[in-house]
Amino acid sequence: MYDSGLGGLSVWRAVRAALPAWPITYLADQAYCPYGQRSRDEIIARALKVGHYLASQGATLLVVACNTATTAAITAMREEFSLPIVGIEPAIKPAAAMSRTGRIAVLATEYTLASDRVKTLLDAHAGDVDVLRRAGHGWVEQVEAGELSGERTRALVRRVVEPLLTENIDHIALGCTHYPFLAPLIREVTGDAIQLYDPAEAIARRVCDLLRQHGRDSQGDSHYRFISTADGNDMGLRLPRLIGHSYPVESVPLD
């Protein structure tokens, strides 16, 4: 499993819950995080480098637990590798399908929101629904720093979410894997009237399906490995807060 940083741990939690007996290697490309400010060519180059490294470590399936990396690089990765690859995308389809007001919001990085992939999702699944696209400026950085509930984080969340309350939306699709860690702060603003959609459980179901299709129903070894392309000390400090448990973190520069 791979993300630009720690946001993909929201997907890791869902996959671990669905496959408690499977070993999972999680790599955070923290040396290059955040991806949202990088060019498409940079993101593709990093994704291929990470993919080759994880394949060399024995990966049998690869989860790209990063919306920006999926948007920019999953086509190139599927052309490069024979491994099954699961990507992630904003949950526009279910949010639009369930909307009663005909207005929803998508929260993601600027890169993801401006991508052709999001345009395709909107054209395919939101033809009769108004979709407000909003970037969570500074949200990724706050999650990377482990600042999930401080006043600065709360202010950054309110700045984006509060104006949506006057827009008659009834669903919010989360389009960045970092953002589910800020769901409690989002709900502080929205209350229970607006439904949040996190695609992590759908990704976990897809992983289970692919493993069954490839004849790998059970593994019997719940070993978890965590890798950072930067100094792993910071990631090690964040794990208890983000996934409720501490693990050793390896530092593996991929330059």
Image: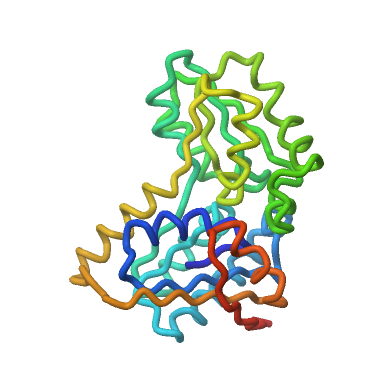
- Identify the residue shown where x is 71% and y is 46%: 139
- Type of colouring: rainbow
**Side of 165 where 63 appears, left or right:** left
Q: Nearer the viewer, residue 146 or 125?
A: 146
Of residue 231 and residue 57, the one placed in the foreground of this image is 231
Image location of residue 107, percent across then percent down: 61, 37
Which image quarter: residue 21?
A: bottom left
In the rendered image, the vertical position of residue 132 relative to residue 155, given as above or below: above
Residue located farthest toward the right when viewing the structure as drawn? 152
> Which image quadrant for residue 187?
top right
Is 28 situated above or below 151? below
Residue at 52% x, 23% y: name it: 192
Q: Count of labels shown?
A: 0
How far across and down, in percent of the image, does residue 27 sit? 55, 72
The residue that appears at 70% across and 68% down in the rendered structure is 32
Rendered position, 127 above or below 253? above
Residue 212 point in image, percent of width and height: 20, 64
Report the quarter where the C terminus lies. Answer: bottom right
Depth order, front residue of 22/203: 22
The residue lying furthest to the bottom in this view is 56
Q: Name the residue: 45% across, 86% down.
A: 56
Instruction: Give left or right: position of 254 versus 224.
Output: right
